[in-house]
Image (cartoon, helix red, strand yellow):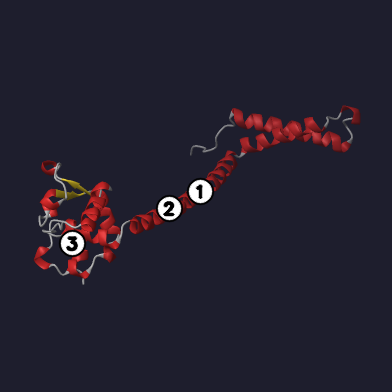
């Protein structure tokens, strides 16, 4: 039967030598074998303590692994705490931005946006306030003119025409509608066949809920 014992390696012999030297010196001080004038000072004693600690780690290298694991665990906890704080800050900022976005657009202008986005036909009326509200949507990037209608103006010449035919709702416009789905008025939800069913499914579901 073969022996499973392993010969001492160089690391073990170094550890034994350092530990033995520190032990012999300590014994000599205690027994008086080393005269007081030949004893080392505090600085050298600290070096011996450090050397002894290194020897212990050479004997038991798994202790170093455990120390590293504790340090890494502490770092992970601290890092996770910082990540959580950043996430809380970002969430709070997103909520503030959402509030600003929702309150920056009047309820009436929002209903124009919903009508243009969600209905097959949304008629333009040549009235000063109506014109101003439609231009607000265009100028703020919530709707844009289709390429073939870039030169089209919302004026008396467009009175009674379908705004849906000449405009496209932008991503910014859809985002506002998603944020304010609870503000969609009942007359839009009850439009039945007038609803454009090619709109995003989540918004279509909101329109079909009563």
Residue on which disc 2 sits: 93
Identify the residue shown where x is 21% and y is 70%: 186
Asked which quadrant contains residue 107, the reply is bottom left
Viewer-proximal residue among 146 and 21: 146
Marks 1 and 3, the one that precedes in the sequence: 1
* Residue at mark 1: 82
Tell me whether the residue at label 1 lies in contact with that at label 2, contact meaning CB atoms closer than 8 angstroms: no
Q: Between residues 85 and 204, which one lies in front from this camera angle? A: 204
Classed neighbour count for the residue bearing mark 1: other residues with Cα under 10 Å, few (<14), some (14–19), many (≥20): few
Residue 140 at x, y = what percent?
A: 28, 48
Q: Residue furthest bottom?
A: 210
Question: The residue tagged with tag 2: helix, strand or loop?
Answer: helix
CB atoms of marks 1 and 3 within 8 Å: no
> Closer to the N terminus: mark 1 or mark 2?
1
Task: Give residue 2's position: percent from left, percent from top.
Answer: 49, 37
Q: What is the count of numbered marks?
A: 3
Q: Secondary structure at mark 1?
A: helix
Q: Earlier in the sequence, mark 3 or mark 2?
A: 2
When the figure is inspected, residue 30 is found, relative to residue 180, above or below; the finding is above
Q: Disc 3 marks which residue?
A: 204
């Amino acid at each position: 039967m073969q022996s499973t014992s392993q010969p001492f390696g160089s690391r073990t012999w170094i550890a034994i030598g350092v530990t033995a030297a520190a032990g012999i010196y300590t014994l000599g001080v205690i027994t008086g074998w080393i005269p007081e004038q030949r004893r080392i000072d505090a600085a050298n004693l600290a070096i011996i303590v450090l050397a002894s600690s290194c020897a212990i780690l050479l004997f038991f290298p798994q202790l170093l692994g455990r120390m590293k694991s504790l340090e890494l665990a502490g770092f992970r906890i601290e890092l996770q705490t910082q990540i959580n704080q950043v996430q809380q800050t970002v969430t709070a900022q997103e909520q503030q931005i959402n509030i600003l976005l929702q309150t920056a657009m009047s309820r009436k202008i929002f209903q124009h946006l919903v009508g243009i986005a969600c209905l097959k036909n949304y008629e333009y009326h040549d009235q000063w306030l109506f014109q101003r509200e439609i231009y607000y949507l265009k100028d703020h990037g919530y709707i844009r003119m289709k390429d073939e209608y870039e030169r089209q103006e919302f004026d008396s010449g467009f009175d009674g025409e379908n705004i849906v035919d000449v405009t496209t709702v932008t991503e910014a416009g859809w985002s506002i509608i998603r944020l304010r789905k609870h503000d969609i008025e009942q007359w839009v939800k009850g439009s039945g066949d007038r609803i454009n069913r090619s709109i995003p499914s989540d918004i279509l579901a909101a329109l079909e809920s009563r």
